[in-house]
Amino acid sequence: MPSLSVILIVKNESAVLAQCLESVAAIADEIVVCDTGSTDNTVDVARSFGAQVHVIPWENDFAKARNASIARASGDWLLHMDADEVLDPLDAPALREIVDTNSDADAVEVILANYCNDPRAWRWVAVPPGAPLARGYAGYLPVGLLRLFRNHRGIEYREAVHENITASVLERGGHIWRSNIVIHHYGYDAPPERRPEKARFYYALARDKVRTNPGDAKCLHDLAEQALACGEADVAESACRRILADNPLHVAAATTLANICLNRGDLDEAHELLCTLAGGGCALPHVQTALGAIAVRRGLWEEAYARLEAARSEAPPAPLATLYLARALDAQGRGDEALTCLSELASALPALEEVARRIRALELRRQGEAHFAAGQLEEALRYFVGALEADSEDPLAHNNVGVVLHRLGAPDRAREAFIRALKLAPALHDAQANLDAC
């Protein structure tokens, strides 16, 4: 019967390693752990599961470390896991069955569920409230990766960061089989205090990858994502444009570039990029959502509702489309409907903090409007500022701040508020009229 080796590279993972190894212990014939310099009790945890532990040097190259683990594994099949991952317990038997019975595949794609609370990421998928394996997260980013593959076939990892075996498998004429097996990844969303350091580290590796593979679309998009994480939008934009010059329908590059354009207020180019995708057969829900968001900012309400409702019906609960729909309703003076929209989303995704903030912001703005109507300008301003602390992208709150500041004799600050409102919603006629009056 074929044997299965689980391979890992680790460093200071004692807090999470046990749950990872426990998820694969029943199906593994061998566990090989390559440690790159742990100073905690990671090695002891690994050995408690019967793992072979090898200490290897860390050379700023994930592929090199992965290949070191391959070289030390004896199984007929290899399963690559990371310490902050857990194999879905319902899928473990299916994975073992592939090892025992599959005579065709050389590598098997699984779904890596990267848990995070970022519905603005275009691949983000919501999970039902209370799903135990979500561990409090509202959703995840699914990525298909080759994680299960045959040993002794010359298959190797490449690329220093976001390392993978795909190119190696294809070069050898290997047959790839896709599965619905899920590996749950909990370390994708790093703690806030670690994010800058992690982003800079991956950014440096991504730059090195592009220097080695200057025309590779995957390497370029990896660079774009890491550049954005480090606040270097110009580098990300350049990388995306290089990809799109060769392939205008590269969904990830077009989506990333469209977001960059939206963030700087270039609605026309963002619209063109997304329409190119839609016209090329890539009318995915996130494309419809982004086009709906542009329509909201332009005040094209009929188009906005049509696109956002289409996205919501295709991929419910579609949190981002729902957030934009609430923004559209609010902008048209339909605040009660907007609040209902947001409340329903909060019930469906209670772990999504952005929804709670939006509800809080709308309620604060309404209280500010009541104080303004009563002539209590200082109180109104306090509530409007509070609303913006909860939702900095609310153009109505920015406009309201400008109105109050103008009444309080601060025309320069009022003008700045109206400009912020118009940057967020160029079709907001009240803000334009107020700016003109200043």
Image (cartoon, rainbow, N blue to C red):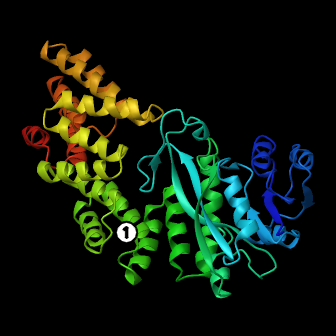
Q: In which quarter of the image is the C terminus?
A: top left
- Which residue is pictured at 25% across the width and 58% down the height? 291
Q: Quadrant of the N terminus?
A: bottom right
Q: Quadrant of residue 372?
A: top left
Q: Position of residue 224 (x, y in %)?
A: 49, 66
Is 432 or 75 nearer to us in this picture? 75
Helix, strand or loop at mark 1: helix
Q: Is residue 44 above or below residue 390?
A: below
Q: Is residue 109 above or below residue 392?
A: below
Q: In this view, does 403 lie above or below 44?
A: above
Q: Can residue 60 be seen in this view?
A: no
Left or right: 321 as drawn, with respect to 235: left
Left or right: 266 as drawn, with respect to 437: right
Q: Where is residue 199 in the image (x, y as percent from the top left)?
A: 60, 55
- Which residue is pictured at 41% across the width and 49% down the height? 120
Is 109 or 266 nearer to us in this picture? 109
Q: Where is residue 240 in the image (x, y as percent from the top left)?
A: 43, 71
Q: In which quarter of the image is residue 264?
A: bottom left
Count residues near mark 1 (Cα–Cα under 10 Å), then give few for <14, some for 14-19, many for 20+: many
Left or right: 356 as drawn, with respect to 375: right
- Which residue is pictured at 60% across the width and 48% down the height? 195
Q: Position of residue 413 (x, y in %)?
A: 24, 34
Residue on which the image places disc 1:
254
Is 127 or 258 nearer to us in this picture? 127
Is 353 or 214 nearer to us in this picture? 353
Disc 1 marks which amino acid? Ala
Q: Is residue 425 visible?
A: yes
Left or right: 11 as drawn, with respect to 119: right
- Which residue is pictured at 69% across the width and 70% down the height? 160
